[in-house]
Image (cartoon, grey):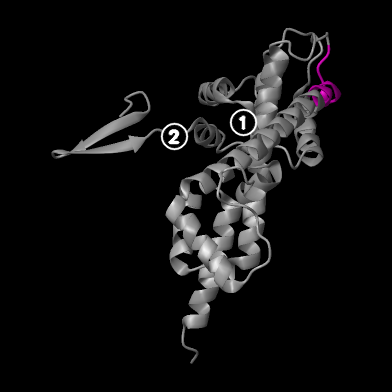
Amino acid sequence: MNNANRNLQTTGNQGIAKAQPKPERELMDSLKGTSALKLSEAKELSEESYMSLIALQESVTIEKAATASTVQQVIGFHGKPTVLKLVCAILKLFNDGLNTSLRMDARQLFEYALVWCGEFPNETVKDLILCLKRVKAGRYGPIFNRIDGTVVSDFFRKYLLEKAEWGEEQNRKFKSDMIQTGNSLLASLGQEKIKEIKLFIQRAKLHKTPEITTPISSDKNFAKYLAENAEDIEFEILEDLERRSKAQNIPDVLAIVETEKARRNQVEEPVD
């Protein structure tokens, strides 16, 4: 157990591990009892809010930001006032930390928080944190002697271009991994299972099917073959495919197998 991440409480001789709150939860808790406008008008963030934001800023990555809940989703769960407070706190940390003569005043900061939530409902609060972190690091060019909503939006759109490029790269990697994983599934079936599959193909007098004696066949072809012939596959083979597709994370093969098993269970159940 990592003592840096756990508080240990003892009751008698029994140790109970209690996880420390995440920075996101600590930040939300620190903002209770105030409003977004009051937060914007405050001279500075409270120490608790400041440290929670710093912790989030240090730990955020493009992957965490891109896969977090969207602004729209968080509004649906926590309500718009809470999201506005979060965005105002993030903007205030950025605004107050700059050495520029023209910065957003309280009303401008509050109004821009409203604008940002409306303009970018499908992005995430962590996107904004990471964007402003990169701005402070000079990633999108120098910060001149003015910061307002227009400038922040311009920086954020530059960040979104990077995020889109990252997403495309992840898609390419995913497709490549799926092909390799699908081939590994075929290779791991073993000669006995391959013989069984060939036998049921012959019994059912099926049309020409993808070659599956080697791991060269693609997972796409194999999934297509399963979808077309799942009803004729013996139950034991289905179970073996289910186990292997779960272990090797091949969702399209797993979905076909589970659908066929569910269909057979429905057919076999008595109708009242």
Whether 194 is drawn above or below 155: the answer is: below
Please name the residue that numbered disc 1 is placed on.
Answer: 63
Label 2 residue SS: loop
Q: Which tag, 1 or 2, sits closer to the chain's start? A: 2
Q: Nearer the viewer, residue 153 or 160?
A: 160
Q: Is residue 148 magenta?
A: yes
Residue at x 62% of width, y 48% of height: 219
Q: Nearer the viewer, residue 7 or 88?
A: 7
Residue at x 48% of width, y 33% of height: 22
**Marks 1/2: CA distance?**
21 Å
Residue at x 71% of width, y 29% of height: 166
Whether 128 is drawn above or below 214: the answer is: above
Instruction: Give, as a single range, the part of the protein colored magenta.
Output: 146-155
For residue 81, which quarter of the picture? top right
| Horizontal relation, residue 17 to residue 182: left or right | left
Residue 184 horizontal/vertical position (percent)? 53, 42
**Callout 1 environment at 10 Å: few (<14), some (14 to 19), or many (20+)?**
few
Q: Is residue 182 magenta?
A: no
Please name the residue that numbered disc 2 is placed on.
Answer: 21
